[in-house]
Image (spheres, rainbow, N blue to C red):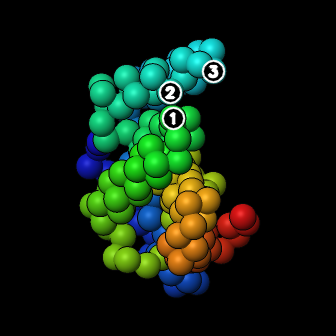
Amino acid sequence: MNDIHEVSLSKNGPPETVLPAEDPAAIESLNEALGRPNDQIRNAVAEVITNWPNNLLAWAALGDFGFDRVESYAAYRVAYHRGLDRLRQSGWKGSGFVLWNKPENLGFLRSLEGLARVSYEIGDIEESERCYHFLKQLDPSYQK
């Protein structure tokens, strides 16, 4: 992770935070894992996490390809909490925009969206609604 953090303090609205870019080697490895046959993707993604445990996109992918909803929920939850930590380290103060149109934010946002979806699927409707509401606060253009 680099030490350059982008936080825009616009007079036209809340500040915008952009997360630092993920390690290019991790992204390359993740893309290779995602290109494997379907029955191999989950294990290949888990191997990426073994090598880059802080990679939010890899955790989001593990959520997408988890063995079951419990594993998916856990993976999304890990990425969500690591993403919150990274947002705070990047100057986020608990409010302001974290937009989908910034590729650096996608690991966090995809994980939050996955957490919302899986929470709904397992019957935790309140958590699901909180997550969807948070997504809309982070990026007002967000659509379910």
Q: Type of residue at label 2?
A: Arg
- Sequence-wise, the earlier of marks 1 and 2 is 2
Residue 116 versus residue 125: which sits nearer the camera? 125
| Residue at x-position 53% and y-position 78% | 126
Q: Nearer the viewer, mark 1 or mark 2?
A: 1
As shown in the figure, which amino acid type bears the numbered disc 1?
Phe
SS assignment at label 2: helix
Q: Where in the figure is residue 10, as x and y percent of width and height?
A: 51, 78
86 or 7, which lies in front? 86
For the residue labelled by badge 3, is the local secondary structure a helix, a strand or a loop? helix
- Among the 4 quarters of the image, the one containing residue 122: bottom right
In the figure, is residue 11 to the left or right of 50? Answer: right
Residue 42 disc label = 2
Q: Distance between the residues labelled 1 and 2?
A: 8 Å
What residue would you read off at disc 1?
67
Q: Hey, which residue is sitting farthest right in the picture? A: 143
Q: Which one is earlier in the sequence, the residue at label 1 or at label 3?
A: 3
Q: Badge 3: how crowded within 10 Å, few (<14), some, or many (20+)? A: few
Which residue: 30% across, 27% down? Answer: 50
Local packing at callout 2 (Cα closer than 10 Å; few below 14, some 14-19, many 20+) is: many
Instruction: State left or right for residue 51 relative to residue 122.
Output: left
Q: Are marks 3 and 2 in contact (CB under 8 Å)?
A: no
Q: Where is residue 114 in the image (x, y as percent from the top left)?
A: 56, 54
Q: Nearer the viewer, mark 1 or mark 3?
A: 1
Per the image, the residue denoted by label 3 is 38
- The label number, if any, that marks residue 110 in the structure image: none
Q: Is residue 132 above or below residue 30?
A: below
Most foreground residue, 42 or 95: 42
Locate residue 83, reporting x and y percent. Answer: 38, 56
The type of residue carrying mark 3 is Asn
Q: Which residue is drawn at 36% across and 51% down?
A: 78
Contact, CB < 8 Å: mark 1 with mark 2?
yes
